[in-house]
Image (spheres, rainbow, N blue to C red):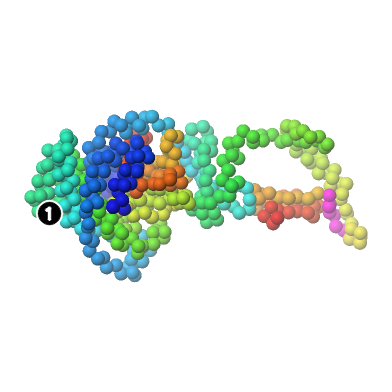
Amino acid sequence: MIQDLVQHIDRLIQQRPAAKTALTPFRELALLMVQVDPQTKPVELEKGVMDMKQQEGFPLFSRDDLPLDFNAAADLLKNFLGHLGATDRDDRKGLKKALKKARDTDGWSRNLFKIFLRQDEEALTLIAGEVDLNPKVIQFLGQVALIPSIYALRDAVSTNIDTDGWDYGYCPVCGSQPDMAYFAKTGRRYLHCELCGEEWVFSRIRCPFCDNEDQETLGYFEAEEEEGLRVYFCRECMRYLKTIDKKAFEEVAPLELENLATIHLDLLANENKFK
Amino acid sequence: MNVTRRDFFKITGASAAGVAVMGLGLDLKPFKSHAQTLKLRFAKETTSICCYCAVGCGVICSTGEAGAGKIINVEGDPDHPVNEGALCAKGAGLSQLANNENRLTTPMYRAPYSSKWQKVSWDWALWTIGKRVKKSRDASFEHKNSKGQVVNRTNGIASVGSAALDNEECWLIQGLMRALGLVYIEHQARI
């Protein structure tokens, strides 16, 4: 998937010009991303343990225990910081500071990744403050720099998982929540993991965040002008999930890109008090 | 407390979109402008069963929150064990059952030897059906057969039940038909 990222971006921009705004700057990062070849350590997984975890609803790994190639991710983060620091962004000074930290301070990048993975907002704000950057920038770059390593791990282990038998709203590989979903040609709904990109089937009328199945409080909205894109929401927990219907499109890009290409739907969901 | 990623974004003062926007150094204005041009419609999904044949396929009906719950889409329910999301051509057109300018809204009557249909009231239709059933039943009723055995039956009327009838409705119809003396009682599921 990583290797095809740039081609997918180019096609998406051509087919849906509205996506250009978000995908053009991401393309620059994708070009750096495809150069990374993470070395995933062989993961010994005992079948009995794996089956038991799956039956009991435990993901294969916890987020802060993922056996990732942090060195490859750190190199990529430095490349991102170097690239973005050379642009005319308002925060370029902060990006340069962060690059210096990443180069000179042993373990700085690894610490950042760990903070991101364990979702420690306080520590993230602190580390961002040290380099005069918005925590969101650090958050984003940390996440994207980890993508090649996380996806390599997912590809190495996901063949061992029966995702069709996984009936939970969180990822069977890393336990993270979905950031997007799609309807397959059969109409079945697949959730897409926000962290490792794993996909698994999930009931159509059920909230993956709170398990609500009350049809009166679940719903969706869509724009009449954008057939095949829906935002499903739950009025119990007020969460939302963007969903793309593959029947409506000839080709659908990896959902990481579709997610970026549909930021306007996030804005509309937020406007309607969904989070 | 398990802080989710989206909670995390919220705590740090951003939505998921906000993180990408900030991370990529994007200007939010084009997204806002694009969002403002869109005409949104809100809907809820309700599971149901196709009303046509005896297979009983599961469907998901989307009803618009605006327009007094009007059906805006019907699709096969992928989680239903009978059809797993598939629908036949007739089932796929289910929404036309509700949204159809050609849909009949009153009973129609074609008089014997007439070539034209005319609209009639429900009261008139039900009264006329009752009257004619009685007339036909009385005319064809047999108390005893040719061997002198008591049969209390009529061969002048047949009942063909629809697949849209559920078990309890079929039971009521069966009782009524038997009371009238019908022998020819069928159901679509057997034909």
Residue A71 in the image: x percent, y percent? 17, 56
The secondary structure making up most of the magenta span is strand
Residue in view at x 29 percent, y 31 percent: B29
The quarter of the image holding the C terminus of chain B is bottom right
Residue A62, above or below B103:
below
- The three-letter amino acid code for the residue at tag 1 is Gly
Q: At x 53% / y 43%, what residue is drawn? A: B74
In this rendering, does residue A235 appear at all? no
| Magenta part of the chain | B150-156
Number of dots carrying numbers: 1
Output the chain of dot 1.
A
Q: Which residue is mark 1?
A: A107
Give how far across and how far down residue A160 sits, in percent. Answer: 35, 64
In which quarter of the view is residue A36 placed? bottom left
Q: Is residue B187 left or right of residue A26?
A: right
Say what secondary structure mark 1 lies in.
loop
The local crowd at label 1, few if under 14, some if 14 to 19, many if 20 or more residues have their Cα within 10 Å, is: some
Instruction: Tell me: A24 left or right of A274.
Output: left
A11 is higher (above) or lower (below) than B36: below
